[in-house]
Image (tube, grey):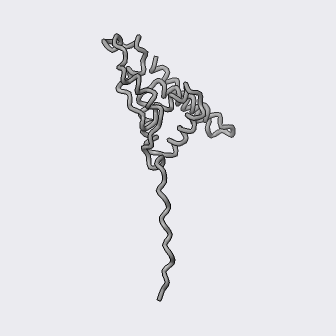
Amino acid sequence: MRLIASLIGAIIFLLGVILAFMPIPFGLILMAVGLFIMLSSSLSVRHLVKWLRRRNARIDRWLDMAAAKLPQRYADVLNRTRPDCPDEETDADLMPAERRTGSAAVRPPPQDRQKAAPAMLTRAPTYPRDLPSPPPPARRPPQRLS
């Protein structure tokens, strides 16, 4: 099911790339929808977006602004791609517990993971652009030439 969702998301994203060059930028909407589908279904796409956010501060700011304006359900998908968000271990973490195989389906998630989940949505200042700027240098009086 996740493979089918990823393929559908990729097709919608590629269709959006093609339509982005039309006079009406309907392709941007399709690109966003395709990206959300792929982010919610593929761990590798999530890692790719996280890598892009680490490398490019502008993309990181754009996705943060988008997450702030989106409903919480969609903002959570984007928040999982933040560079300071902990990585998921496997693709099985994305699946519901009923569909997992093995002993992990019987065990509930650890308590510390449940408590840490809301904390990962808050952002700590990890980038130089997030830290307060240093005070301006003190002005020195002009020197007189003798």
Residue 39 lies, in percent from the top left, at 48, 28
Residue 62 in view of the camera = yes
Residue 96 lies, in percent from the top left, at 43, 15
Q: How many marks?
A: 0
Residue at left offset 69%, top offset 40%: 23
Query: Is 44 on the left-hand or right-hand side of 68?
Result: left
Residue 45 in view of the camera = no
Residue 34 lies, in percent from the top left, at 54, 29
- Tell me: residue 9, above or below residue 146: above
In this view, the residue in front, 14 or 79, is 79
In this view, the residue in front, 103 or 143, is 143
Residue at left offset 53%, top offset 38%: 64
Query: Is 87 on the left-hand or right-hand side of 10?
Result: left
Residue with the most extreme left position: 103
- Tell me: residue 11, above or below residue 103: below
Residue at left offset 56%, top offset 27%: 72
Query: Is 54 on the left-hand or right-hand side of 66?
Result: left
- Based on the displayed image, in which of its 4 quarters is residue 44 positioned? top left
Residue with the most extreme bottom position: 146
- Tell me: residue 35, above or below residue 137: above
In this view, the residue in front, 117 or 2, is 117
In this view, the residue in front, 25 or 98, is 98
Residue at left offset 48%, top offset 54%: 133
- Based on the displayed image, in which of its 4 quarters is residue 50 positioned? top left
- Tell me: residue 42, above or below residue 102: below
